Amino acid sequence: MTLLLDADDVGVATAARIITDGGLVAFPTETVYGLGADAANEDAIRRVFEAKGRPADHPVIVHLCSVDQLGTWLEVVSVSVRSLAERFWPGPLTIVAPKPASVSSLLTGGQPTVGVRIPDHRVALRLISESGTALAAPSANRFGGVSPTTADHVMAGLAGRIDAVVDGGPCRVGVESTIVEVTGGGVTLLRPGRITVDDLQATLGVDLVVPSQVSRAPGTLSSHYAPAATVVVAHDGEGALRAAAACEGRGERYRLLGLSGALPDSPMVLESFESVEAYAHGLYAALREADRAGIEVVVAVVPGPEGLAAAVTDRLMRASGGASVYGST
Ligand code: TXA
Ligand code: MG
């Protein structure tokens, strides 16, 4: 059975006890809900992989509540790591850096690096601190599916497979953290998110390596973050209309998704967002709503390549598996 806990003193204390006993607790962060386990307990880490149905070579992020824990989880705390941590934590940035021998390779999927972050969420920080450890926490969904941004989303995918969910309401940002790899050779973007390339470069004073086709971060495979519906990406309203016409030609149930200014005037709009922030915040709930409503194809107009829009575009491209793209850009 999976307990649904309130995000109050009793709920957090109960959740912390489950963690220290080696159990699994889903908890809210500012990005998406994480599925937490004691990052120092290998049996607990194995259970996270089982509950998610996640392949063992996909590393998980270690969530901390204080920079004082960095010395335990990283081989060295370099100048770049320290300045990123000071500027962006607590916040939606994951730093991947060389791991010390003491960090389990179960956490890192066999890689010589480990990902760490301090989430900007009161409940997450209290849970980590009361557990007295760090929390290994991938997003709290079955492998390959849409990340959860509410406790209900977590329950829909993992009820019966985990011990508890702490209900902290909807997540503020809505898409997963930005991931950067920091090594002696420089800083590489592994996954775009709320903290943008410009934000990072301004702090580091050097250019980031931004691979066009991100392949290093497992879990950034194609067809990840995907609903049951097929996702078709359009670059503009005109592309969306052509995609819609193709769906109509095949007799498919489809709906449109995108920024209000970019969507064509159509009765088939599933959701139109007023800002990129709203798009990021509401994206995963909208994809889940499409599945609930039995929609076969979601035609999503991507918001562009800059800033937070890059993160929304990235997740939609991955949800589409990189298949059909309509429009010029
Ligand atoms: O916002 C987030 O990051 C959320 C919340 C819960 O913190 N977590 C999250 O975890 O999205 P997950 O496991 O769904 O995605 C973590 C990503 C994966 O793509 C994984 O491959 C990458 O982080 N990652 C973690 N450690 C890594 C490492 N050592 N090297 C390369 N990639 C790593
Ligand atoms: Mg995930």
Image (spheres, rainbow, N blue to C red):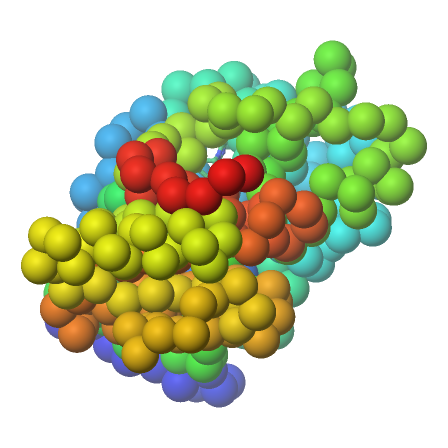
Residue 287 visible here? yes
Specify whether 291 is left or right of 152: left
Percent across and percent down for residue 141 are 29, 55
Answer left or right for 211 relative to 4.
right
Outermost residue toward the left? 251
Q: Where is 228 relative to 54, above or below?
A: below
Residue at the extreme right of the image, as rendered: 205
Residue 312 position in % (x across, y down)? 51, 53
Where residue 50 appears, x then y in whole percent? Answer: 20, 43
Name which residue lies at 52% across and 72% down. Answer: 260
* Along the line of sight, the residue nearer the viewer: 285 or 265: 265
The residue drawn where x is 60% and y is 64% is 276
Coordinates of residue 22 in the picture (x, y in percent)? 32, 53
- Which corner quadrant holds the N terminus? bottom left
Quarter of image, res 207: top right
Residue located 25% across and 38% down the image = 54
